[in-house]
Structures are given as structure tokens and as C-alpha cells.
């Protein structure tokens, strides 16, 4: 008895679902990149890393405040 081979399903480009971008890319802003920028002596690189660090600190501070607010309301 002959067996049939399973047919390969064709997937159109329209059927492909792209996941939504939920998170921003992670940029490590630890001492190493900061010291590396300072050591390079490149003023543009130092300004860029400093701006990224300030933005990151602002976002973390905001997220921490929201977390503390939720923790406070959860205790009640």
C-alpha cells in the first residue's frame, strides 16, 4: 500500500505575525561603559554616555516611584 507524503503548507507573507515591540533595547549603563568613555577622551562619546545614563536614571527613578506607590496601596 502506497503512503502519501504530507504536503508542505505554504505560508504567505501576510500570515506571518510580527510580535509587537514591548520593551526598549537594554543598554548597560554600568561603571565600565562610563569609565571607558572617560578613558577614551572622546568628548562626543562621553556626552553620549552621560546623556544615556541620565535618561536611564530618570526612567529607573520613575519606575521605582510607581512601584513604591503600588506597594503602598497594596498594604492597605
Image (spheres, grey):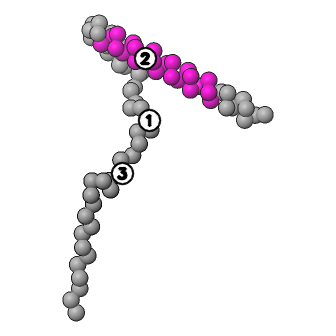
Residue extending furthest toward the bottom = 1
Magenta residue check for 73:
no
* Residue 44: % across, % down: 29, 9
Magenta residue check for 56:
yes
Say which residue label 2 marks: 53
Residue at figure coordinates x 35%, y 19% from the top left? 33
The crowding category of the residue bearing disc 1, from other C-alpha atoms within 10 Å (few below 14, some 14 to 19, many at least 20), is few
Residue extending furthest toward the right = 76
Residue at figure coordinates x 52%, y 23% from the top left? 60
Secondary-structure class at tag 3: loop
Q: In this view, does 29 lie to the left or right of 10?
A: right
Q: How far apart are marks 1 and 2 (CA)?
A: 18 Å
Q: Which of marks 3 and 2 is in front?
A: 3
Residue at figure coordinates x 27%, y 58% from the top left? 12
Res. 65 image quadrant = top right
Q: In this view, does 46 lie to the left or right of 58?
A: left
Q: How far apart are marks 1 and 3 (CA)?
A: 18 Å
Res. 39 image quadrant = top left
* Residue 1: % across, % down: 22, 93
Using the image, tell me which numbered label, if any, was put on residue 23: 1
Instruction: Name above or below for residue 7 compared with residue 4.
Output: above
Q: Distance between the residues labelled 3 and 2?
A: 34 Å
Say which residue label 3 marks: 17
Secondary-structure class at tag 1: loop
Q: Give the range drawn in magenta.
A: 45-67
- N-terminal-most mark, 1 or 2: 1
Q: In this view, does 66 lie to the left or right of 42?
A: right
Magenta region's main secondary structure?
Answer: helix
Q: Quadrant of the C terminus?
A: top right
Amino acid at each position: 500500500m502506497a503512503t502519501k507524503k504530507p504536503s508542505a503548507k505554504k505560508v504567505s507573507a501576510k500570515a506571518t505575525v510580527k510580535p509587537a515591540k514591548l520593551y526598549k533595547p537594554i543598554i548597560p549603563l554600568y561603571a565600565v561603559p562610563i569609565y571607558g568613555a572617560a578613558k577614551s577622551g572622546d568628548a562626543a562619546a562621553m556626552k553620549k554616555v552621560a546623556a544615556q545614563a541620565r535618561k536611564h536614571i530618570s526612567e529607573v527613578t520613575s519606575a521605582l516611584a510607581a512601584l513604591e506607590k503600588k506597594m503602598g496601596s497594596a498594604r492597605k
